[in-house]
Image (cartoon, grey):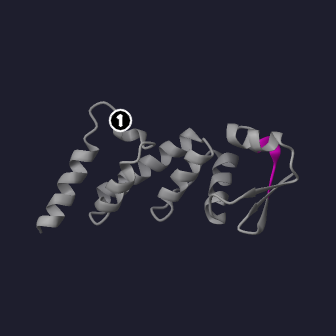
């Protein structure tokens, strides 16, 4: 009973499901028949909707950063946390990832870095330094 227009294509959803998220609730209160979304790609928006509907999602390494940004934009804290965890796991597995991950993780909305005792930055810097010296 609500239509989103993303990348020029309609995506249909149910208001009752979207009301669980404060950002969507605010959008729906405006009572527009079609809501244009131009801040995220269609594929990322579909993943956000999947999460809102099911409370579950499989986050791929390829989309984790964009999905995190969408979760931040749409104010979905648990999805943000899931993306942060996936990014941290990816860093542990893929030694080629640190430079890009470090750049992204230094952004202020990445809460994992502010946990007491977090050694993420030190570990990443050491790995980047090791790569540079190799």
Residue 21 visible in the picture? no
The crowd level at tag 1 (other Cα within 10 Å; few <14, some 14-19, many 20+) is: few
Q: Where residue 97 sits in the image (x, y, percent)?
A: 32, 63
Judging by the rendered image, the residue that carries numbered circle 1 is: 114
| Magenta residue span | 12-17
Left or right of 51? Residue 118 is left
Q: Where residue 116 sits in the image (x, y, percent)?
A: 30, 30
Q: Quadrant of the C terminus?
A: bottom left
90 in relation to 133, above or below:
above
Q: How many marks?
A: 1
**Residue at point 47% right, 65% down?**
62
**Residue at point 29% right, 61% down?**
99
34 in relation to 110, above or below:
below
Q: Residue furthest left?
A: 133
79 in relation to 103, above or below:
above
Secondary structure beneath dot 1 equals helix
Residue 42 visible in the picture? yes
Q: Where residue 118 sits in the image (x, y, percent)?
A: 28, 37
Which picture quadrant has residue 42?
A: bottom right
């Amino acid at each position: 009973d609500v239509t989103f227009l993303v990348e020029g294509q309609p995506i249909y959803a149910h208001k009752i499901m979207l009301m669980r998220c404060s950002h969507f609730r605010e959008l729906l209160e405006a009572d527009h028949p079609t809501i244009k979304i131009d801040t995220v790609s269609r594929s990322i928006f579909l993943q956000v909707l999947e999460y809102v509907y099911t409370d579950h999602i499989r986050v791929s390494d390829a989309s984790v950063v964009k999905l995190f940004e969408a979760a931040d934009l749409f104010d979905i804290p648990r999805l943000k946390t899931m993306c942060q965890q996936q990014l941290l796991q990816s860093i542990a597995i893929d030694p080629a990832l640190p430079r890009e991950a470090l750049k992204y993780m230094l952004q202020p909305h990445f809460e994992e870095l502010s946990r007491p005792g977090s050694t993420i930055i030190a570990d990443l810097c050491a790995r980047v330094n090791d790569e540079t010296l190799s």
